[in-house]
Image (cartoon, rainbow, N blue to C red):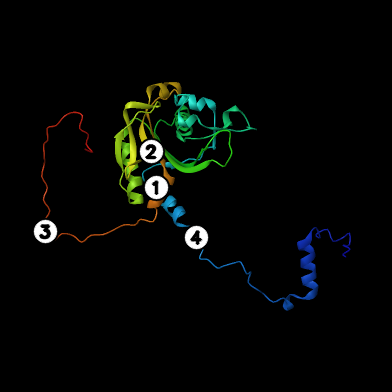
Amino acid sequence: TLQVPAYREDMDSYPDVAEEVIRMYGYDHVVPTFMPAARVTMGGLDQKLKKEMKLKRALCGAGAYECIHYSFISPSDLDLLRLPQDAPERKIIRLLNPINEELSLMRTTLAASMLNAIARNQKKGNLEGRLFEMGNVFLPQELPLKDYPDERNTLCIGIFGEKESFYTLKGMAERVAETLFVQFSYEPVQKPFLHPYQAAAILWEGKEIGYLGKAAYEVEESLDLRTDAYILELDLKALEPAYDRGASYTPLSRFPGESRDLALVMDREVTCGQ
């Protein structure tokens, strides 16, 4: 039983009492012990964080700036992307107590936030730039929710300006692949918010893990963009099995190299990849 004098205003809770007892008992009598469940570690970043940091530095090296958006979007953002009612992105979690209608849905894509960021920059006079965001999307297994949603780490890149093009964005996708020591392939794809002839699906080991392309004219018009916008979205969680990959080396050939120019005639439908 303790009685604390009124002038000891610093005595507030159990740790303060423990400190007084130890002080009276004498710090010299306290034998230091190691916590049974504790273990000593080297600290630092794990493999996943190291790769993500390396990826961010590579994108910054390509002239991109990192941006961070809310994890919430507006119902109007889904309409901005011209998504049909049965689109997977519309299978979305609605908050019970949103701050306002503009922040009432848990995002299932980073594209809307990136396009809005490009529009805000252009309205402030920034008519060219490169942006990227690394964040989670929230994909519910079923609605109404019965379990936690799948939080998938996703990369979104947005570029805009007169000097930017579809191939600039594809080059940034290749920089991501080089950083992770993987190889992407590309196939034509149709997205309601992308230009029908400037859009491609990104594949890794035969599995579609993202897309890239130019924003559709209707999207650019609704955002009142003054220069074209290009957007890329990549599922980083699907790439995690490659995070432990490193560079490999082969010896230089002892023989001189040889190069030739080839001119081929083929059907218009044959793609470069084929």
For residue 58, side relative to residue 26 (left or right):
left
Contact (Cβ within 8 Å) of mark 3 with mark 2: no
Q: Which mark is residue 210?
A: 2
Q: Earlier in the sequence, mark 4 or mark 1?
A: 4
Q: Measure how far apart labels 1 and 3 are at the Cα level.
A: 37 Å
For residue 196, side relative to residue 53 (left or right):
left
The percent coordinates of residue 191 (x first, y second) are 38, 28
Q: Which residue is mark 1?
A: 239
Identify which residue is drawn at 65% across, 74% down. 33
Q: Nearer the viewer, mark 1 or mark 3?
A: 1
Give the residue type at disc 1.
Answer: Leu
Q: Residues within 10 Å of mark 2 (few under 14, many from 20)?
A: many
Q: Which residue is mark 3?
A: 255
- Res 226 quadrant in image: top left
The percent coordinates of residue 112 (x first, y second) are 47, 31
Which secondary structure, mark 2? Answer: strand
Q: Measure how far apart labels 4 and 3 are at the Cα level.
A: 45 Å
Q: Which residue is mark 4?
A: 44
The percent coordinates of residue 272 (x first, y second) are 22, 36
Q: Measure how far apart labels 3 and 2 are at the Cα level.
A: 40 Å
Q: Earlier in the sequence, mark 2 or mark 4?
A: 4
Q: Nearer the viewer, mark 4 or mark 1?
A: 1
Give the residue type at disc 2.
Answer: Gly
Contact (Cβ within 8 Å) of mark 1 with mark 2: no
Which secondary structure, mark 1? Answer: helix
